[in-house]
Amino acid sequence: MNALNLQGVGHAYLGRTVLDGIDLAVATGEIVALVGPSGCGKSTLSHIAADLIEARAGRVLRGYRRHTMIFQEPALLPWATAEDNIAFSLKLAGVPRRQRAARIADTAARVALLPEDLRKFPVELSGGMKQRVAIARALAVHPDFIYFDEPFTALDVALRRRMQDLVIDTCAGGQLSGLFITHDLQEAARLADRIAVLDSHGKGVLGIRPLPSAPAERTDATNFDWVQSALASDPLFRHIHDVDERQIT
Amino acid sequence: MTTRRHGTLLPRLADRIGRVLEFLWSGWAGLAAMCLLAAVWQAGHEAYGPFILTSPVETLQAAAALASDPRAWALALTTLQRAVTGFALAALLGGGLGIVAGYSPATMRLASPLVTVILGVPPIAWIVLAMIWFGGSDATVRTVILIAALPVVFLGAARGILTRDRGLDRMAQAFGAGPLRRFLSVGLRQTTTTLFPGLALALGTSFKVAVMAELLANAGGIGGALADARTNLDIANALAWVIVSVGLLIAVEYTLIYPVKGELDRWRRAAQPWGIRR
């Protein structure tokens, strides 16, 4: 069974259709990147899939056990320390109090957060550190599906690479599936097993392209070549960098 | 586990003691302001004579005399009890209604004209009505406090919910929090930013209105004592009672509002680098 199945999903804001007839499947253990120009409704689609908003049409079938989400902005509780922010997801997942400290320490080590960082409040952390905490919060509950809603867009290039490496390492075990929303084809080519392209006006998924090997096995050179040839010769990616500011996301 | 506990407990304790000491140290500024006030007061006394304005020293002596009188304590406690219970009513009702209005735009649209009306009616009119309804009892004073203090608490709570970070709500929802969980863990905490200034204002209003209502409704307490002082043209005593009521307000504010606010605002202090902390 697939981890996620979207069938004919459609949505409208204030009577204006933003998504229509979206079919998309994410198999267990794979990361699907959903790319498309800004304003094509990819964030909305991820919110529908994660049950944050209700679809106006279609069906969402979830075959996974537990999902978490990493947002574009870290969305940390400003009044709680990094540690308590990670504990927030554990609390909501019903992890007993006694086990939380060990889980937090474990997850913090995975995303390279030091014990002294854990005692800091979000205001004391840099943008990258905040996003690290947000990733730790998502990983701490041991999800088997993660929604990435353009999580690294606000970070600078070097930091973005490190965060992407973190995601590749975490997902390399094959236990995790995910839907990665991004408008950066380069990023999609680094992280994903398959890349789905959404129509510029949200009218369906235009097509899906598999990547040649597992993310952990690819190099920058192969990724670069893939993106170059995709942009040059694959008609699917022709409108990927179109921008229409008037559209509501 | 125990070693870990100790590891986090000690710095936390040190942090708390540090905050208390820093707070006490800031008392010097308050003391300086009081001395300035006393100086202006003394100047007024020397210009107009003791019949119009007694000197600060005489007033303090009168206040000291009140402090050694058990009957005065009983009067002050009556007012304190009325002000605090009235404030608690206003805080619960105003806070509750404000939170509901913050979440429900329809309630907000209905409530805001009512708040304007309540704000527009002078408290003195409410005192007259409450006197007719309840006579010179606790209920009169509490009713007037409730009506006078309700709007600020209501607006503070509503604004806090309205201006909350929706991203945090969405985050909590994505991690599986239901509406109640989201309110308790994310929404409620965010209202404190605007709710606490409202509460501090409401507490001050409670004391002022309590004394005024007592005086006008002849309901005893500090207001009643002030009425007596007026009849006897006893300026020193009247001013001493004013000092007592201000003292009570300060005591309640610093034992009730500020410790809670300090605890909730720990993260805000963390944002301020050393050297510019006030």
Image (cartoon, coloured by chain):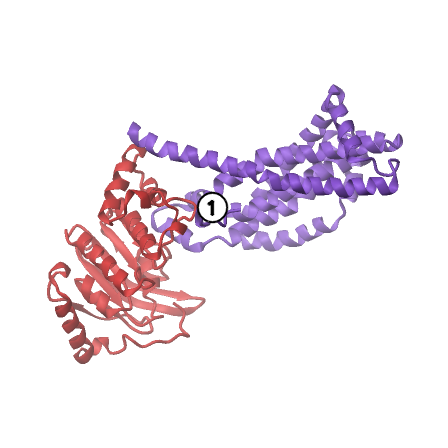
Chain colours: A red, B purple
Q: Is residue B79 left or right of residue A39?
A: right
Q: From the top left corner, tell me how far across and down residue B161 is, in percent.
A: 52, 50
- The answer to whether residue B133 is visible is no
Where is residue A229 drawn, in percent x and y?
A: 15, 76
Secondary element at tag 1: helix
- Residue A37 versus residue B129: which sits nearer the camera? A37
Of residues A188 and B121, the one nearer the viewer is A188
The residue at 65%/33% (across/down) is B84
Side of B15 relative to A107 (left or right): right
Q: How many marks?
A: 1
Residue occupying the point 14% across, 66% down = A211
Q: Quadrant of residue B124?
A: top right
Q: Judge from the rendering whether residue B37 lies leftward or rightward of residue A83; answer left or right.
A: right
Which chain does tag 1 point to?
A: B
Q: Is B106 placed left or right of A88 in the picture?
A: right
The amino acid sitting under disc 1 is Arg
- Residue labelled with disc 1: B269
Q: Is residue B229 visible?
A: yes
Q: Residue B76, percent across and down?
A: 72, 27
- The picture quadrant where one finds residue A150 is bottom left
Residue B52 position within the rendered picture, expressed as x and y whole percent measured from the top left: 87, 38
Packing grade of label 1 (10 A; few <14, some 14-19, many >=20) is: some
- For the C terminus of chain A, the image quarter is bottom left
